[in-house]
Amino acid sequence: MRIAVCDDNEIDREIVCTLLQRVFEEDSVQPAPALEAYENGLVLLDDIRDGDWFDIILLDIYMQDHLGIDVARKLREAHYTGAIIFLTASSDFAIDGYDVEAAGYILKPATVERLSEVLTRVIRAIEERSYPVRRRNAMHRVPLREILYIESVNNRCILHRQNGESYNIYKRLDEIESELSDPRFLRCSQSFIVNMDYIIKADRSFYLTTGDIVLIRQRSLKSIQQAYYDYLASNRPEGAKVPLKTSNK
């Protein structure tokens, strides 16, 4: 997990980072999230636009060159979907926070107790939207949105991540399927679970945005394709059209 702290006041920035480290130690958060500090919200925004990612952003509202609420709006416009927590000396912008789906407010001066309260709630929500995997004796959480597909190979399963990483999971695919209680995932064969958000074409196999091909159980081809089209219909933006079904002839 990665957390960004953005505050143009160096002292406040260092205090928050130090308090966060105390929270992780006292709450036994393992592994401890990686912290990165920013003094300028626009630099943070540029990094997000360039593909960097933070699970949580703590963002000061009152900065010298711009308001944090404006940075938050631009982050959402850049399709940042992580948690935004505002650091502020005033609650003046509390209503505006609804527009950017703020996960919380922490009034300055921040305290360990308040940081722990807000982060516990936010991290719990993140954990509900991620899947735990173990690598090199450490536990990692892969956001559900980044799971491309999972395949069963011999005595293990392999989770493929959108960024090209893969993880060995020593469980049966049936067990993983029951743990992925999210509508975006479709069991499309005895050996594959696919994240339907990455499908660009449904033929006799699923073709993904990454160029990967995921096999469909042929005796259930029509019903599996229909499950995909039903998912598209229920999640498409208003006014958008569902792609035409591919002929199976």
Image: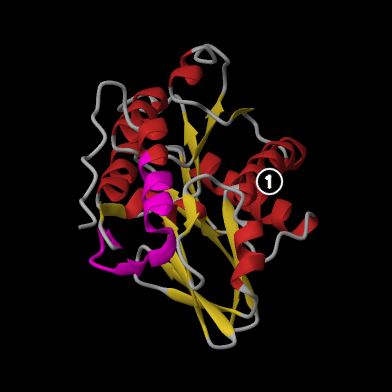
Tell me which segment is drawn in magenta. Answer: 205-229
Q: Quadrant of the C terminus?
A: bottom left
Lateral position of residue 92 relative to residue 68, left or right? right
Tell me the residue at 57%/17% (across/down).
90
- Residue 78, can we see it? yes
Q: Position of residue 243 (x, y in %)?
A: 22, 40
Dot 1 falls on a residue whose secondary structure is helix
Q: Is residue 14 or residue 230 the one in the foreground?
A: 230
Q: Quadrant of the N terminus?
A: bottom right
Q: Position of residue 198 (x, y in %)?
A: 33, 53
Lateral position of residue 158 relative to residue 26, left or right? left
* Position of 228 relative to 79 (above/below): below
* Position of 204 relative to 70 (above/below): below
Q: Is residue 138 or residue 41 the one in the foreground?
A: 138
Tell me the residue at 36%/69% (across/down).
215
In the rendered image, residue 230 lying in the magenta stretch gets the answer no
Tell me the residue at 41%/23% (across/down).
69
Q: Which residue is mark 1?
A: 124
Q: Amino acid at mark 1?
A: Arg
Quarter occupied by residue 166: bottom left
Q: Residue furthest bottom?
A: 154
Tell me the residue at 49%/73% (across/down).
191
Q: Is residue 40 or residue 205 the one in the foreground?
A: 205
Lateral position of residue 87 relative to residue 241, left or right? right
Q: Position of residue 196 (x, y in %)?
A: 39, 51
Lateral position of residue 229 relative to residue 192, left or right? left
* Position of 231 relative to 195 (above/below): above
In the rendered image, residue 210 lying in the magenta stretch gets the answer yes
